[in-house]
Amino acid sequence: MSAIFERRNALTGDINIPGDKSVSHRALILGALSDGDTVIRHCLKAQDCLDTMNCLNHLGVSFEDKEDAIIVHGQGMHGLKEPPHVLDVGNSGTTIRLLSGILAAQNFVSEISGDNSILRRPVDQVIAPLLSMGANISYKFKNNCPPLVILPSEIKGITYKGSFASSQVKSSILFCGLYADSETTIIEPYQSRDHTELLLKAFGATLLESDEKIIMKPADKLNAIDLSIPGDISSAAYFITAALITEDSKITLRGVGMNPTRNGFIDVILAMGADVEIVNAHYGLEPVADVIVSSSKLHGITLEGEIIPRALDEIPILMVLACYAEGVTVIKDAGELKIKENDRLDVTIDNLTKMGANIAKVNDSIVIEGGHPLHGAIIGTKYDHRIAMSFAIASLAASGKTEIIGSECVNTSYPGFYETLRSLFPKN
Ligand code: S3P
């Protein structure tokens, strides 16, 4: 399928943002390991999370899909069952990384795999620390990529000092550490998103956190909870950018997650000069607020260091935004994007170049000279949801038509994306 977009202005509207993908995955998994029924309100029902549910279902966990919540019938920490066949994560890198940590500690054999993109994405960053915890995991084709074959083993606590910040690596170690013989310590160079730590504590695990490390004690059991998932800031970022780069726009986004380890995108756009207000802040498990954003004159900045893990999935849309800002934007330290659903740096650079952007890779940095008009183009998404959404937005301030090839890949994280975007267009 393809979708066609062209220049628009005067976007208006008031939209609700679907549940956070990272938090939804974790709540589903921890609910499955808990005693009792976990109620997850505003859970994201996009393909990636459905794939997590499907894997858990093959491990003996059942779900009820109510209108306003997913109910997870928890099996307890030791209640998962040997899956009848290979677990299939589809396109979801988060599912395979997080579940590996849990499967490593079960007393049954499992094999876990996914689609063609998953078969090409190395997982050694996650598997290496699990191996040092005593896990018995092998790569079926000896290539650092899935499928993974996981055999039972005794898990021991470790101290893991990461050379880069990754929430998926951290979370997989923590999940495995629940079953360890002693405590697990994690030290990261910069803090990655802390949804796992917040949820583990809410489900009853014991974690001690300081600026430089996390220490988690093994758990005997987890207790079911009732929670509401915040709106996904990564999804909100597309609409916020749409309002910033189009003329005479003003939109409101409701219920956006504002976890400080995750909302680097907001800090970046404020530093670029965005007209954005954060209102109605309220606190549940995580902070949530409404965002009011208007068309803005932006200027380029340099992004590097601790801001990168806090805005990791937003780098493609920030590259689009930089093209519409005056002056030069430089993005450093974003090498982790090369092993996402695709090499997101190269795919974004290629497509922005097709649209006439002045963008280049200089050593390991991306340098974008903004302020040059963009024109429509045929966008190859490589079936990556974040690329499709970024370029649907880029087209709104470009001349001519832009065609997004494989546009349906947005279903990975945001099934209603195009409908919500079109709802902001002027009605005439
Ligand atoms: C995620 C963490 C990020 C992000 C990914 C989801 C998570 O990856 O890119 O889309 O849910 O933990 P890292 O593990 O590189 O931080």
Image (cartoon, rainbow, N blue to C red):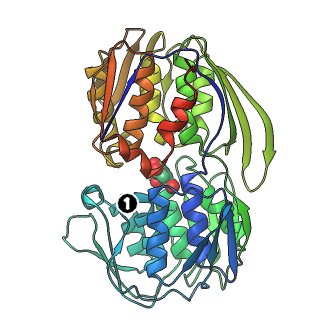
Q: Is residue 188 left or right of residue 360?
A: right
Residue in the foreground of this view, choosing between 272 and 116: 116
Residue type, label 1: Gln
Residue occupied by mark 1: 125
Q: Nearer the viewer, residue 159 or 427?
A: 427
Other-residue count near label 1 (Cα within 10 Å), few / some / many at <14 / 14–19 / ≥20: some
Above or below for 375 versus 113: above
Observer able to see residue 413: yes
Residue 317, horizontal then vertical, whole percent: 45, 31
Which of these two is toward me, 256 or 107? Answer: 256
Left or right of 43 in this view: 418: left
In this picture, residue 84 sits left or right of residue 326? left
Q: Secondary structure at mark 1?
A: helix
The image position of residue 169, as x and y in percent, is 46, 60
Query: Can I make out residue 331 in this image?
Result: no
Name above or below for residue 230 compared with residue 73. Answer: above
What residue is at 62 percent from the left and 54 percent from the top? 194
Return the x and y of residue 71 as percentages of the image width and height: 65, 72
Which residue is painted at 27% across and 42% down in the image?
382
